[in-house]
Amino acid sequence: MTSTGRDSLKKSTGVPKTLVRFVRFVNRKLAVNENVTYGEGLRAGRGSVVSSPHGLLLGRNVSIGPRSIIQVDGEIGDFALIGMGVQIVGRDDHATDEVGVPISLATRASERPGSARDRIEIGRDVWIGASSVVLSGIIIGEGAVVAAGSVVTKDVPAYSIVGGNPARILGDRFDSESQRAAHASCLDRLASHPTVRLTLADTTHSHL
């Protein structure tokens, strides 16, 4: 890591980099629970919870904001940015059709075989704004942006900007297909250079 990167890390947090990294390590250990696999550079904010009924894969340099909850199967791509207080949850977490059984005691998703409705696919470089709710069973395409406070119940096209309840398309992140292609190419190059990935993860703002 360059001296510029180290200086940037200390400046962005106001505390020594060794303490920042230690707290990030502790936060990550506290946040990640069963059936979750993650790549290098994962940052999990205070009070966040990441678990899965059957299996969840997080890519490299995923950032999860404080008090966010992720409890789904599926995959979250490299460089995904998940804001504070986001909930990414299953739409079928509890059975509702068991006659005579209160919902709180009904079959949970982890107690039955998984299904496509339990899964979510979030592409690379997706930004999900603070306090959004995202239900399982959908795909959020690469590079998409979800506005803060949105409720996402359907697929989101790649590089689109969505918002609202329910979320709808508000615009596009880039002006042209050539810009989207160039951005995707840059993501490919970053993915092939581990040292670049680590430098980016270490010098961005902290979610202590």
Image (cartoon, rainbow, N blue to C red):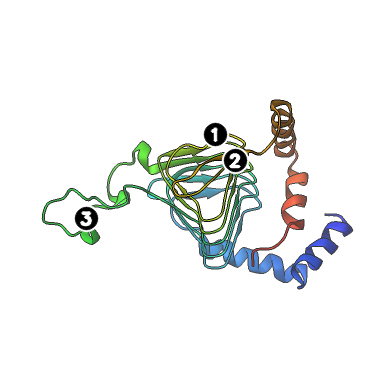
Q: Considering only order in the chain, which callout, 2 or 1, is on the residue closer to the N terminus?
A: 2
Q: What residue is shown at x 54% (from left), y 34% (from top)?
A: 157
- N-terminal of the pair, mark 3 or mark 1, is 3
In terms of depth relative to the viewer, which is nearer, 137 or 75? 137
Quarter of the rendering containing residue 125: top right
Give SS at disc 3. loop
Looking at the image, residue 43 lies above or below residue 115? below
Front-lying residue, 74 or 154: 154
Disc 2 residue crowd, few under 14, some 14–19, many 20+, Cα 10 Å: many
Identify the residue under disc 1.
157
Residue 158, position in %: x, y?
Answer: 58, 34
Can you identify the residue that label 3 sits on? 106
Marks 1/2 in contact by CB < 8 Å: the verdict is yes
Residue 138: image location, x then y, percent: 44, 39
Does residue 130 lie above or below 75 as drawn? below
- 87 sits left or right of 158 in the view: left
For marks 3 and 2 on the same chain, the one whose residue lies earlier in the sequence = 3
From the image, which quarter does the C terminus lie in?
bottom right
Q: For the N terminus, which image quadrant? A: bottom right
- The residue that mark 2 highlights is 144
Query: Picture coordinates of residue 92 (x, y %)?
Result: 31, 47
What type is the residue that disc 1 sits on? Pro
Query: Which residue is the extreme one toward the right?
Result: 3
Task: Give, as a three-letter code, the residue at label 3.
Answer: Ala
The Cα atoms of the two marked residues, 3 and 2, are separated by 35 Å
Q: Are marks 3 and 1 in contact (CB under 8 Å)?
A: no
* Whole-number angstrom distance, CA of label 1 to CA of label 2: 7 Å
Image-based side of 187 in relation to 160, left or right: right
